[in-house]
Amino acid sequence: MALASGSKLGPYEIIAPLGAGGMGEVYRARDPRIGREVAIKVLPASFSSDPDRLRRFEQEARAAGQLNHPSILTVYEFGVHEGAPFIVSELLEGETLRGRLSAGPISNRKAVEYAIPIAQGLAAAHDRGIYHRDLKPENLFITRDERLKILDFGLAKLVQPEEPPARTSSLPTTPTATEPGTVMGTFSYMAPEQVRGEPADARSDIFAFGAVLYEMLSATRAFERPTAAETMTAILREEPPELSTAKRDVPPSLERIIAHCLEKDPGRRFQSARDLAFALEAVSGISTATASGVPGAAPRSLRLPWRGALAGVVVAAIIAGLALWIGTRLVRRTQPEFKQLTFRRGTIDAARFAPDGESVVYTAEWDGKPVQMFTAKPGTPGSRPMEFPEKTDLLAVSPSGELALLVRASGSGLFFYSGVLARSPATGGAPRELLENVQYADWLSDGKELAVVRPGETEYSLEFPMGTAVYKTRGWISNVRVSPNGQWAAFVHHPNSGDDRGLIAVVDRQGRKKDLTRLFTTAIGLAWSPDGQEIWFTAADTGGNRALRAVTRSGKEKVLLRIPGILTLFDVSQTGRVLLSRDVTRVGIVGVVPGSSSERDLSWLDMSMLGDLSADGKSVLFGEVGEGAGPRYIVGLRNTSESSPVQLGEGYDLGLSPDGKWVLSINGYEDPPRLVLLPTGPGEARVLSRPSINLNVDGGYWMPGGERLLIWASEREQTPRGYLYGLKDGSLRALTPAGFHLMDPRPISPDGKWIAMLDKDEKPVLFPLEGGSPHPLPGMTKADSIAGWSGDGGFVYAVSGSIPVRVFRVNISTGARQLWKEIAPADLAGIGAVGPVLVTPDGRYYAYTYTRTLADLFVVDGVN
């Protein structure tokens, strides 16, 4: 389907063709809605009848559309026009790496500059379970401003947790199929396992990466031979010529990285693209060659004749010493040294240095198992489990080595949990319990008393020391740490419940609190600098990629360390060593919806949170709250029968109207927040009139019929309660008593007569909207949430438990409670929370949010 200039493809205006290939035609186009030029890749109609081509094209769209990374081509939309599928992506200006290589080899420095973002982009894809499988210079694009982009995920494989496919010894002849045992990719860059027809994974991309980097430095392909059969034989049995022979100025450290990528056995290669990126960053400072081409050769102006040799030796020694000192300072400033301590899949909950400043105590949830405590030390392989019961979490380590622990912790979500504070010698044994309902704690400098954070019914309190409340907030408090002199407690103040936006604050023993920073989109992790003059913390201005920062008590701030990914600070030793994790966090949505008999991924960007599920299961309302959302959260809607979601606006999503035409949202960036109606189709957003000048709105719910809202709000410093708000006339009526709590996320009955709540004694009740006393809600507990109601209102779907969560069908008249389903992702590694869960009235469809964090723990030297 050739498109003429000036024609339209959906809303896009075709400007000119850009090229064509085996997988489609590419056009330059313009999106008149926002005035942006884009690239559109169209699969011709003659190809759409080819199931294999069509499947591969759709795979490309799904894979690339899930990725959000500066080194990966951004995909805006996937659609179908007159039977022909198309992908809309960003328009790039520049040339492919293949075009750049036509001029000859690339310098060491520039090759490493190109290689690092390639590795980082692959790491982002691999973290999502997406493998490129056809990495080559043609699929790497260099923009005019020298940024590198990875193109064409047309051969990418979306990997689901499953058993490895059986190996096969046959070598198929077609390069287009994707079944196990089939050769995929381009011959010169295939990994040995691909040549053998075995499944490809992240390490296959790392092999191709090594072949590409080899070619960048030498302008020759590592394994190319006259025929395809000879090329594949070379990949299986031969080594490429040493780069030092063809190009003498390649540093040995860089050649070792390439050799490590090109190992025949996948188990001997780099095991992750993140490790590869770190290795490249480590050599990036030595990748420039001297004029002589021999590493370490002195510049001509410093070569001394034999005459005056003694003076020359003295001068050379001074210069060498000065260079070493300057080099050491530069390395300390620009190249902190990372020493990785952990190598398993899972989440790190807490970590602290032992009093010696070398050993580390940490708690982690490895491979989907319950939290356990370990010790580790840089330079010593592996971690040693400590003799504590499972589900014992670390809070702090005293100067004498005594541990503050959290036992029997429980809660919901990532942020709301508490347990019993206990103390124990580091040698283990039964912890001595001290105080209930504690979430965070830290030792005072004397190692005898503790500061604690305790969540309450309506507010968090900080006790400094324990038993003396010095600060309370309706938001929440995390990461309390006491200054070395014992006079200040620093913490992260999160103004909104359930949101990790936060700022750094300090409070003294008299309760004088001071905010030191602005509000960050995410702030988690805090410790005092060794001299007590600064507070070091990890936070992000926009998105979710937290950097390591420092702030003084006067509010002077600086960035200490920024690398791709999410950093979480745990501790700083007395010598300035930093203990932190590098995290990959994914918040996603999965569910069973019309057209699927098993769970499918319904996510969009990196942090998709379920907001609502329509009664027919065909529409999913969600919010994006991570790096992909940028500085403000995104409200999105996905039609489950289509591949691409629609961005409706900014803010927090609260619910889909009964007729599906409007979304109730709240703009959390205004003070006070405002309720906004966003249209799901044509129309303009409507900002609702403020219900009351004294009312602080926290959230809202649609009432059946769509003409009224249940608003959850509070007056000034009062306890939140429910109000009935009329959309047509703006009327407002106080409804529920203060001290009652909604049983989210679906508290309202289908007929609009009842609200499921917890009363002041935390007993489940049905509160009548038309007046009268609450009725008991049998079969329910205070730990339950309501995922939905049956169509006739006779049953609720009650969710309880941790992971997997259990969903019960509860008869609200008799209290009969029947297990309906257990819900959890198939792969439990790193899963920190499951929920909310939503179920359609007929019980046929459901969806839920999960949070997965995979973390590696590092000790970092040279941060200043």
Image (cartoon, helix red, strand yellow):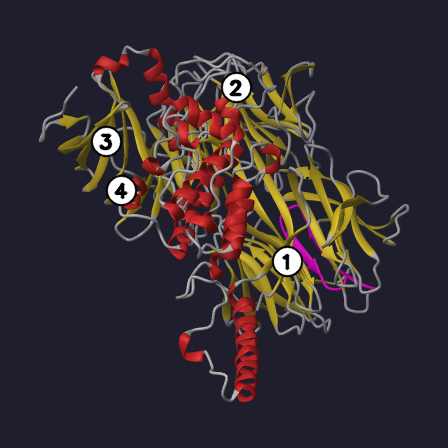
Q: Counting residues from the N terminus, which is met first, the one under dot 3 or under dot 1?
A: 3
Mark 3 to mark 1 CA distance (whole Å): 54 Å
Are the residues tagged 2 and 3 within 8 Å (C-beta)? no
Q: Counting residues from the N terminus, which is met first, the one under dot 2 or under dot 3?
A: 3
From the image, tell me which residue sits under label 4.
Answer: 99
Extent of the magenta region: 448-465
Residue 835 on the magenta segment: no
Q: Counting residues from the N terminus, which is met first, the one under dot 1 or under dot 4?
A: 4
Of marks 4 and 3, the one in the foreground: 4
Q: Say which amino acid is labelled 1.
A: Lys
Mark 2 to mark 3 CA distance (whole Å): 31 Å
Are the residues tagged 3 and 1 within 8 Å (C-beta)? no
Q: Counting residues from the N terminus, which is met first, the one under dot 1 or under dot 2?
A: 1
Q: Say which amino acid is labelled 3.
A: Ile
From the image, tell me which residue sits under label 1.
Answer: 472
Instruction: Left or right? Give the position of 296 relative to 400.
Output: left
Mark 4 to mark 3 CA distance (whole Å): 21 Å
Under circle 4, the secondary element is helix
How packed mark 3 is, by other alpha carbons closer than 10 Å (few <14, some 14-19, many 20 or more), is many
Number of numbered discs overlaid on the protein picture: 4
Task: Give whichever of 72, 837 is nearer the camera.
Answer: 72
Mark 1 to mark 2 CA distance (whole Å): 42 Å
From the image, tell me which residue sits under label 3.
Answer: 40
Task: Give whichever of 268, 48 is nearer the camera.
Answer: 268
Q: Is residue 515 visible?
A: no
Image quadrant containing the C terminus: bottom right
Of marks 1 and 4, the one in the foreground: 4
Under circle 1, the secondary element is strand
